[in-house]
Amino acid sequence: MEMPSLTIGNITSRLPIIQGGMAVRISMAPLAAAVAEAGGIGVIAGSGLTADELRSEIRAARAETSGVIGVNIMVAVRNFAELAKAAIDERIDLVIAGAGFSRDVFDWTREAGIPMVPIVGSARVAILSEKFGAAAVVVEGGDAGGHLGTDVPVRQLLPGILEATSLPVIAAGNIVTGGDIRELLEAGAAGVQMGARFAATVESSAADAFKQMYLEATDEDVVIVRSPVGLPGRALRNPLTDRLEAGTEPRIERCIVCLKKCGKQFCIMDKLVKAHDGDVEDGLVFTGGGVARIHDIPTVKALMERLVAEYRAAGEMGTV
Ligand SMILES: Cc1cc2nc3c(=O)[nH]c(=O)nc-3n(C[C@H](O)[C@H](O)[C@H](O)COP(=O)(O)O)c2cc1C
């Protein structure tokens, strides 16, 4: 009846809830620490930070909690190795990596005894991850937030991944309520990773205008953009996404060479930072498939208590 704990390698969290890493600067120390303190796994987004910034976020989170803190780093960012090594140096509890596949990070984490958790969108990559020594996999469906590796919703993707690997499988995509968590756990997931729901909390570092946009969004406001990272991404419709759709977005004027390979349709770093800062007209407001079901901005503590209560209630009703 109660939510089970989640064990990944040598770490265990009281609740099977991972707060997804959200760049740029959305999931920082305050959010990650609050989630960890409430019994989940708090994740600091490393992409878009310098190694020194990431170190100080990890230290700030550690100062607030003795709970489980991870980092999320996109393999596609140019300073991926530097960020991963900084996090390992700081004795992070786990490393989650998506938007590409790095063989090297398995070696670095193995040597340090730190669990490595790749984000996968197919059985093939789940099998590869297990072979390289992953401690678990996050399976992110096409209904998830941010960059997307597949267009198949997680509830359809999950059975094939469970069949392909014996690792703990964490489900991500359009998970907003405790009822959703129960549904995915009953389908065989060991835990869930939730992004958008945590972006709209008090402790999220997104600007108020960003959080407000979430509250007002309906399903019709959700669009898929082609990111210069080389993947589609889920975002909220605004003047920027209209220009991208119409092909009228001006060319990049200044390039800081943040990605290993960039399609240059627009500057992803610039637009994600703008959204974080509250420019929700010219910034890229990444979101998840369940944004239309988000109606408030609770504290993380209140949200986690609500998720646990909803999970319990869904079990008592025998429905999800
Ligand atoms: C604003 C935002 C930023 C995100 N940034 C990242 C990121 O930097 N790296 C990553 O692997 N996933 C990123 N994601 C994906 C989340 O970590 C999570 O897997 C996903 O949002 C789950 O889907 P949901 O939002 O429907 O819960 C982001 C999602 C959002 C909403």
Image (tube, grey):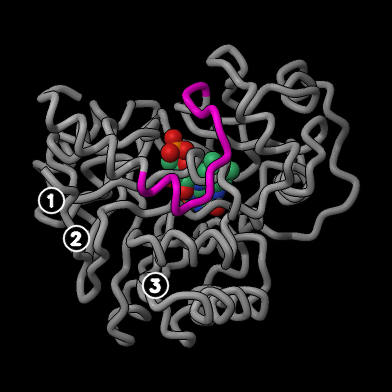
Establish whether ligand 1 lies closer than 8 Å to the Cβ of label 3. Answer: no
The picture quadrant where one finds residue 60 is bottom right
Say which element carries label 2: helix
- The CA distance from mark 1 to mark 2 is 7 Å
**Which mark is first along the chain, 2 or 3?**
3
Say which element carries label 3: helix
- The CA distance from mark 3 to mark 1 is 20 Å
Segment tinted magenta in the rendering: 292-305
Residue shown at 29%/72% (left/top)? 115
Magenta-span inclusion, residue 315 = no
Residue shown at 72%/25% (left/top)? 241
Residue on which disc 1 sits: 165
Furthest toward the right, the residue is: 253
The 10 Å Cα crowd at callout 2, few under 14, some 14 to 19, many 20 or more, is some
Residue on which disc 3 sits: 105
Residue 208 on image: x %, y %: 73, 42
Q: Which disc is residue 303 wearing?
A: none
Residue 16 on image: x %, y %: 25, 53
Tag 1–tag 2 contact (CB < 8 Å)? yes
